[in-house]
Amino acid sequence: MTAAVLRPPVHATVLAFDFGARRIGVAVGNTLTRAAQPLATIDEPASAARFVAIGALVHTWQPDLLVVGVPVHADGTPHPMTSRAQRFARQLGGRFALPVDEVDERHTSELARAALSGRGRAGRGERDAVAAQLILQSWLDERQPA
């Protein structure tokens, strides 16, 4: 989604976000291991509280860059959440002075839902973090040589 592809250092910690109107899923990964794992789901209604929680994760993990999944329709056209996720990405970059890469997150929530099917309400709380993991794993796979 961004014009220039971000090239992280060989060994970089990356936080990824699955932005949603109600919750934000967060995953962490590393460019050396090329592996992503679900980290947290931020379930705060107020924007200020969301950024406090994100700030705590940034402080703890000291990422070199951030990745934000940007939702689009199946045909790639934007919808109302597209601009909201892009705004969130700009806010992250401004607040934390870190580079932010935006990536297509088509179908990650559905894939996360399928991966957690059978877990009932417990799986619901994990779904956003697993969606963030899928976003980050896709980012790592696309930007790192095999």
Image (spheres, rainbow, N blue to C red):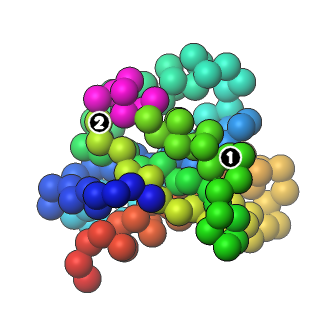
**Relative to residue 90, is residue 68 depicted above or below?**
below
Q: Quick one: quadrant of the N terminus?
A: bottom left
- Rendered residue at 48%/49% (across/down): 68
The location of residue 105, given as percent across then percent down, is 57, 62
Under circle 1, the secondary element is helix
Compared with 80, 22 (above or below) is: above
Magenta residues span 91-97
Q: Main secondary structure of the magenta part?
A: helix
Kindly report the distance in space between the C-alpha atoms of the residues bearing marks 2 and 1. Answer: 23 Å
Residue 41 in view, yes or no: no
Q: Can residue 142 be seen here?
A: yes
Task: Name the quadrant of the C terminus.
Answer: bottom left
Q: Residue at x 28, y 49 (%)?
A: 13
Residue named by callout 2: 98
Q: Which mark is residue 21?
A: none
Residue type (three-letter) at the residue carrying disc 2: Leu
Residue wearing tag 1: 81
Q: Is residue 18 magenta?
A: no
Assign a secondary structure to mark 2.
Answer: loop
The three-letter amino acid code for the residue at tag 1 is: Met
Task: Tell me how many marks there are.
Answer: 2
